[in-house]
Amino acid sequence: TVGTGGNQVFLGFSTVSDLLNLPRAYNSGWNTQVEMDATYGVCNKALGVIQIGVNSLGAKLRPIVYSVITCNETSEFYANCWDGAVRALLLLQRSFVPCSDAACAICAEITACLSHEKSAEIFSREEVQRDQRLPVDIATADNSTAIHSFIRNELGAWHAMCYAHLVRE
């Protein structure tokens, strides 16, 4: 996803394996918990990176998408980053065709992940296809108002604030 927010630029990127972390979270049967944060000063330039991922057992963060931004984090940038990842995942779900090698472990993993009962039920919901939105149960982040505005207004998830570090805005 490449886009602009006024005169600001963001570039969202992911991999198929990273995108599949969201259906893996659904398929686990646990609440889907999304975690997000931003960091700045990348390569000693005026760039920041937003990261959104899901939490898995063992307190492991599994990335879904990253976005390079040219300004401070805003709820708009979090929304653009998340929406781009959701659109890419739904496109993968609709259009994935396995290769011709029946023994291909990569295609088998993608197919199993996307066709699992829990993910298949979520992907088949009319509102998911119509609105291009995927459900999230819980979202955690630091105390940035931009993140919490995004969680409340875009995800509609219960959100928890991480006090491991404080953010001044």
Image (spheres, rainbow, N blue to C red):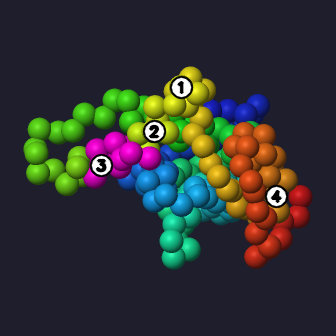
Q: Which residue is mark 1?
A: 126
Q: Which residue is mark 3?
A: 112
For label 2, the SS is: helix
Above or below, 129 against 151 in this view is above
- Lateral position of residue 22 relative to residue 146, left or right: left
Q: Nearer the viewer, residue 139 or 4?
A: 139
Give neighbour class at mark 4: few <14, some 14-19, many 20+ (Cα, 10 Å).
Answer: some
Residue range in magenta is 109-118
Q: CA distance from mark 2 to mark 3?
A: 14 Å
Where is residue 84? Give x, y as percent. 56, 37
Q: Is residue 15 magenta?
A: no
Amino acid type at image mark 4: Ser
Amino acid type at image mark 1: Glu
For label 1, the SS is: helix
Q: Residue at x 76, y 62 (%)?
A: 160
Q: CA distance from mark 4 to mark 2?
A: 33 Å
Q: CA distance from mark 1 to mark 2?
A: 10 Å
Amino acid type at image mark 2: Glu
Where is residue 61? Give x, y as percent. 54, 66
Position of the C terminus by quadrant? bottom right
Q: Which residue is mark 2?
A: 121
Picture quadrant where residue 55 is located: bottom right
Q: Residue at x 76, y 31 (%)?
A: 6
Q: Is residue 113 magenta?
A: yes
The residue most toward the right is 169
Q: Nearer the viewer, residue 2 or 16?
A: 16
Q: CA distance from mark 3 to mark 1?
A: 22 Å
Q: Which residue is mark 4?
A: 144
For label 3, the SS is: helix
